[in-house]
Amino acid sequence: MNDTAGTAQSETTVLQSAMRGLACKCPRCGQGKLYAGFLTLAPACDRCGLDYAFIDTGDGPAIFIIMLAGAIVVGCALVVEVKYQPPFWLHAALWLPLILATTLLPLRAMKSLLIALQFHHKAAPGRLIDREK
């Protein structure tokens, strides 16, 4: 990972890092913008200059949100089906907006939360160690 974090990183608590992540702010200074678009990361912080090249969230936030959204939507759909038995077109009209809301709205905040925690804990890709025998 990037070692340009300096002392500002060591002074922050996990809660402060999490709050910076949920606010979609720079994990180091907490003021600069993290995103240039909806989910497109900026190349660097516009305040402190932290290079965002170290960031690799993978599919973690998306999988977590899909699992939660799936449980919510399927649970609600089952309750409505058992209780009211609406036609299929009404199911589509009810659940498609809920699916979009429960997946797209929290995705940006969850991705930035994972980035902030990755920065706080200095997470980096694993490396193989050369062991001499």
Image (cartoon, rainbow, N blue to C red):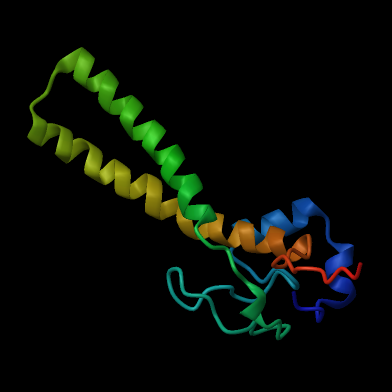
Q: Residue at x 84, y 61 (%)?
A: 12
Q: Which residue is outermost to the top?
A: 83
Name the spot of residue 23 as percent of width and height, x first.
60, 60
Question: Percent x, y for residue 53?
Answer: 63, 80
Specify whether 115 is left or right of 1.
left
Residue lying farthest front?
133
Q: Residue at x 40, y 32 (%)?
A: 71
| x then y, percent, for residue 122 | 78, 65
Quadrant hosting residue 78: top left
Of residues 31 and 12, the one nearer the viewer is: 12
Q: Can residue 128 be seen in the rendering of this structure? A: yes
Quarter of image, res 30:
bottom right
Residue 53 higher or lower than 92, as above or below? below
Q: Nearer the viewer, residue 64 or 34?
A: 64
Count up the numbered dots: 0
- Residue 23 seen in the figure: no
Quadrant where the image shows the N terminus: bottom right
The quadrant of the image that shows the C terminus is bottom right
The spot of residue 61 in percent (x, y) is: 52, 54
Nearest the viewer among 57 and 75 is 57
Q: Residue at x 35, y 48 (%)?
A: 101
Looking at the rendering, which quadrant does residue 17 occupy?
bottom right
In the picture, measured across the screen, residue 11 lies left or right of residue 14, that is right
Residue at 47% x, 74% y is 40
